[in-house]
Image (tube, rainbow, N blue to C red):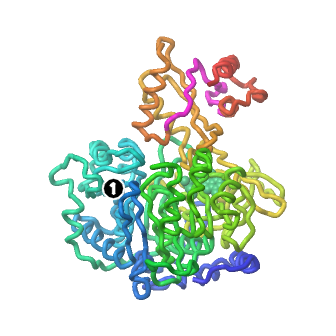
């Protein structure tokens, strides 16, 4: 695929993509391996909504991500796996190894009764087998639903039930920093209420003791190595489902965002190549000293449990034939220099991480950065939340040594790939601005009523007015929810849920969510989800949760909780509430602050005025706005006085 190499070319391609999107995307899609060409490029309406790309096209994404590269890149590194324990030898996986492993798992899945269209839950830590498993599903046309291994048994169960998964792929345990984490026991607990699951395939990773349920549980190492390392790829239609990924919305229940094969393949590869500007053409990654220009290595530090891991660890880089790092550990183990050490160790050239990690490492001081050269780096990336100017500058100066362009990539689980970002070193960048839309992306800002805000130097809610190939197709099992969440707020537009500013040059800066979704350390968590978990505690009468600015996490979780006056020991209650949230969602949703209150600011119609709670949580109580419509304005004073 030809990539954009100058700002002029970007402008010309952008123009073409808007004037004639179908020809634009046809040219790009032609670079892939199709068994049958599509008959029509696009059909869409944002009312139903219904979006179809590359209609009647037949192919398999794994043949594009793996087999297609084997003629020239069989020995090229697909992944270098860096374990949590830095003394563990890295594992190198070539494209040929990847092919063989994926086929073996695909054959195993078939032998366990998995067919095209069946849903497969993957609940695994960051080991290569997690990515192999995703691709194995795609190989046979099964639909993967990866659940981040930090979610609790109850959150896992909800996701398995929602899409009736037939099998769960998991491990015995996981390593996270200094901790050993239980995984299989959580699966066992979840499956007590998941009758759809017939089999569990367990990869022995930590070799910790696990329970085995006869007839249901199968040990990976007992079957996968014996399976055949060739497996014919299932012929898939462009609009067949590739995967489901659950994400938080404004209601309590996470929704299963559905992505389909064709558009997702084309868009993730296109954006990977253009945004990061990696040279993936080299046929193999040599072991010894090679001129730097001939050896490029990508590292996206996300977990495969999130969309970033799907699009820019698994699919995008492999479709492009690139080499990547797959990292099991955490940025602060054994110390806060781990990222930088791994960059030097493996000579990483392109590094993609989240602002929360940058801020956390910045807070540890430069002593953890200084021992490392970081001279192989060429491009830095940021994703997941707005990157504040200070973190941007720190990243630019201390990691990029002022010579690496930073791509601030804005996108969402629903968008499948990056929508707004600079192209590394090719288009202009500006600290804390995602900058310009990718070719094919037509953003617009609207006011509360949905009127388009034209011109520059303006702020509004960010919408997209034309389909792009990797956009959400539906929410699993409930199409109406997809319509309500994304296509009903503003008629005829896809609404992102984000607020946004467009500066005098037309550069976009995403300012954060404007709905009831928080962004905690780059992870989306709905306030309603946390509230319903808190409300499960027997002593909780009612709760309201809001996000507040947090130095490291971007946003922290602030919970206002009503308990009966008879509950006296508030400190232990707070601990119990945190434990409840851990149990129901997982540690990522744990409230940072819990304020016990006797009432919540409600309107006469019973709606909680979150605006007021947000102000209190932010510590900005000088102007709480109009409180006259409240049922009982006096609760506001109590809440302000009791602020933590
Ligand atoms: C936020 C992650 C500002 C945004 C890929 C979005 C960002 C939500 C950026 C999606 C960025 C993501 N600048 N905000 N570069 N990237 N966001 O679905 O609020 O986990 O709506 O996808 O993260 O989070 P999600």
Q: Assign the N terminus to one quadrant of the image.
A: bottom right
Q: Position of residue 250 (x, y in %)?
A: 56, 44
Inspect this view and state whether residue 143 appears.
no
Q: Which residue is drawn at 52% across and 25% down?
A: 542
Q: Does the magenta stretch include residue 596?
A: yes
Q: Which of 278 and 184 is in front in this view?
A: 278
The residue at the far bottom in this view is 71
Above-or-below relation of 159 to 323: above
Above-or-below relation of 465 to 530: below
Magenta stretch: dominant SS? loop
Name the image quarter holding residue 471: bottom right
Q: Position of residue 563 (x, y in %)?
A: 50, 19
Inspect this view and state whether residue 337 appears.
yes
Above-or-below relation of 588 to 109: above
Quick check: which quadrant has ligand 1? bottom right
Left-right relation of 122 to 634: left
Q: Which of 438 and 277 is in front in this view?
A: 277
Q: Give the range drawn in magenta.
A: 590-610
Q: Position of residue 119 (x, y in %)?
A: 35, 60
Above-or-below relation of 516 to 629: below
Mark 1 — residue? 165
Q: Position of residue 297 (x, y in %)?
A: 52, 71
Q: What element carries label 1?
A: loop
């Amino acid at each position: 695929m030809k990539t954009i190499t100058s700002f002029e070319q970007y402008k010309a391609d952008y123009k073409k993509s808007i004037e004639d999107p179908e020809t634009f995307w046809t040219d790009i899609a032609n670079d892939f391996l199709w068994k049958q060409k599509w008959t029509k490029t696009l059909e869409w309406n944002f009312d139903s909504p219904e979006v179809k790309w590359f209609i009647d096209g037949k192919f398999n994404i794994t043949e594009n991500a793996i087999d297609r590269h084997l003629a020239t890149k069989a020995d090229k590194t697909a992944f270098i796996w860096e374990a949590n324990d830095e003394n563990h030898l890295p594992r190198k996986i070539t494209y040929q190894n990847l092919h063989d492993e994926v086929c073996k798992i695909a054959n195993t899945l078939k032998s366990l009764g998995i067919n095209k269209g069946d849903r497969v839950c993957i609940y695994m830590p960051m080991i290569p087998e997690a990515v192999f498993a995703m691709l194995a599903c795609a190989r046979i046309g099964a639909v993967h639903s990866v659940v981040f291994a930090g979610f609790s048994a109850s959150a896992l169960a909800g996701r398995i039930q929602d899409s009736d998964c037939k099998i769960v792929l998991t491990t015995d345990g996981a390593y996270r920093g200094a901790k050993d984490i239980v995984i299989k026991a959580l699966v066992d607990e979840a499956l007590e209420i998941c009758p759809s699951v017939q089999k569990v395939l367990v990869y022995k990773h930590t070799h910790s003791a696990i329970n085995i349920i006869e007839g249901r549980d199968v040990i990976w190492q007992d079957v996968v190595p014996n399976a055949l390392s060739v497996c014919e790829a299932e012929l898939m239609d462009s609009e067949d489902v590739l995967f489901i990924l659950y994400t938080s919305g404004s209601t309590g229940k996470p929704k299963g965002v559905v992505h389909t094969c064709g558009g997702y393949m084309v868009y993730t590869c296109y954006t990977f190549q253009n945004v990061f500007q990696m040279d993936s053409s080299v046929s193999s990654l040599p072991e010894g000293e090679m001129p730097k220009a001939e050896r490029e290595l990508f590292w996206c530090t996300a977990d495969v449990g999130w969309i970033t891991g799907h699009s820019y660890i698994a699919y995008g880089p492999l479709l492009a034939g690139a080499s990547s790092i797959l990292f099991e550990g955490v940025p602060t183990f054994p110390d806060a220099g781990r990222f930088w050490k791994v960059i030097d160790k493996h000579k990483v050239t392109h590094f993609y991480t989240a602002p929360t990690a940058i801020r956390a490492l910045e807070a540890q001081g430069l002593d953890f950065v200084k021992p490392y050269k970081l001279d192989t780096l060429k491009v830095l990336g940021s994703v997941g939340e707005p990157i504040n100017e200070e973190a941007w500058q720190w990243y630019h100066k201390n990691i990029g040594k002022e010579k690496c362009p930073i791509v601030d990539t804005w996108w969402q689980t629903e968008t499948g790939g990056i929508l707004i970002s600079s192209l590394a070193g090719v288009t202009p960048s500006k600290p804390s601005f995602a900058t310009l839309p990718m070719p094919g992306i037509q953003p617009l800002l609207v006011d509360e009523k949905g009127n388009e805000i034209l011109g520059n130097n303006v702020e509004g809610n960010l919408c997209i007015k034309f389909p792009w190939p990797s956009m959400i197709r539906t929410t699993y099992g409930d199409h109406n929810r997809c319509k309500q969440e994304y296509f009903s707020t503003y008629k005829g537009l896809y609404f992102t849920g984000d607020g946004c500013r467009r500066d005098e040059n037309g550069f976009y800066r995403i300012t954060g969510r404007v709905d009831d979704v928080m962004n905690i350390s780059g992870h989306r968590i709905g306030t309603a989800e946390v509230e319903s978990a808190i409300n499960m505690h027997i002593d909780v009468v009612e709760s309201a949760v809001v996000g507040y600015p947090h130095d490291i996490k971007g946003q922290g979780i602030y919970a206002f909780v009503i308990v009966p006056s008879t509950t006296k020991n508030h400190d232990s209650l707070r601990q119990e509430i945190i434990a409840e949230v851990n149990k129901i969602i997982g540690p990522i949703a744990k409230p940072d602050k819990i304020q016990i209150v006797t009432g919540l600011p409600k309107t006469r119609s019973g709606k909680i005025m979150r605006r007021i709670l947000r102000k209190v949580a932010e510590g900005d109580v000088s102007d709480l706005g109009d409180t006259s419509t409240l049922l009982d304005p006096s609760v506001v004073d109590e809440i302000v006085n009791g602020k933590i």
